[in-house]
Amino acid sequence: MSGDHCDLLCLDLQKAEAIRAALPPDERLSATASRMKALSDPTRLAIAMALSLSDELCVCDLSWVTGRAENLVSHHARALRSAGLARSRRDGKMVFYSMTELGRALLVAAVSEVST
């Protein structure tokens, strides 16, 4: 093997076809990659981690907890919601966010080595 590619084509067709058949379609891979990208920003990751420690938090609480401006937190919380990792509800003039089950599961997988 030279570099990072094979110099000789020696495909194990049975093994390769079984693995290929087990892969999800490209649309599902793209959706999952987008969700994972939503957690790749440090601010969104901090917001998601804070939300995972509570049933729900308003934007002002998230701002205080993460030490970031409310408009920034609001923007990033919307991005988590758009990715399907969080949900929101309005109560008067306040907006509350909480993690979805998918968001919690992805967060656990992504940050299992991070201690809080």
Image: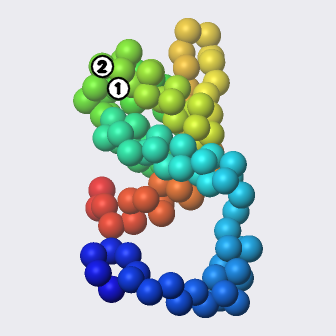
Q: Which mark is residue 63?
A: 1
As drawn, 53 above or below 88 = below
- Give the residue number, with chain letter if any, for mark 2: 69
Between 34 and 6, the one lying in front of the other is 6
Note whether 109 is above or below 60 in the view shown: below
Tell me where residue 32 appears, x and y as whole percent: 59, 51
Residue at the spot 52% in from the left edge and 35% down from the top edge = 80
Q: Nearer the viewer, residue 4 or 83?
A: 4
Tell me if I can see residue 29 in this picture: yes
Give the colour scheme of this rendering: rainbow
Marks 2/1: CA–CA distance: 6 Å
Count residues near mark 2 (Cα–Cα under 10 Å), then give few for <14, some for 14-19, many for 20+: few
Position of the C terminus, as image quadrant, is bottom left
Looking at numbered disc 1 in the image, what kind of residue is underneath it? Answer: Ser
Which quadrant of the view contains residue 71?
A: top left
Q: Indicate left or right for 4 with 81 as reference.
A: left
Question: CB of mark 2 within 8 Å of CB of mark 1?
Answer: yes
Can residue 101 be seen here? no
Q: Quadrant of residue 60?
A: top left
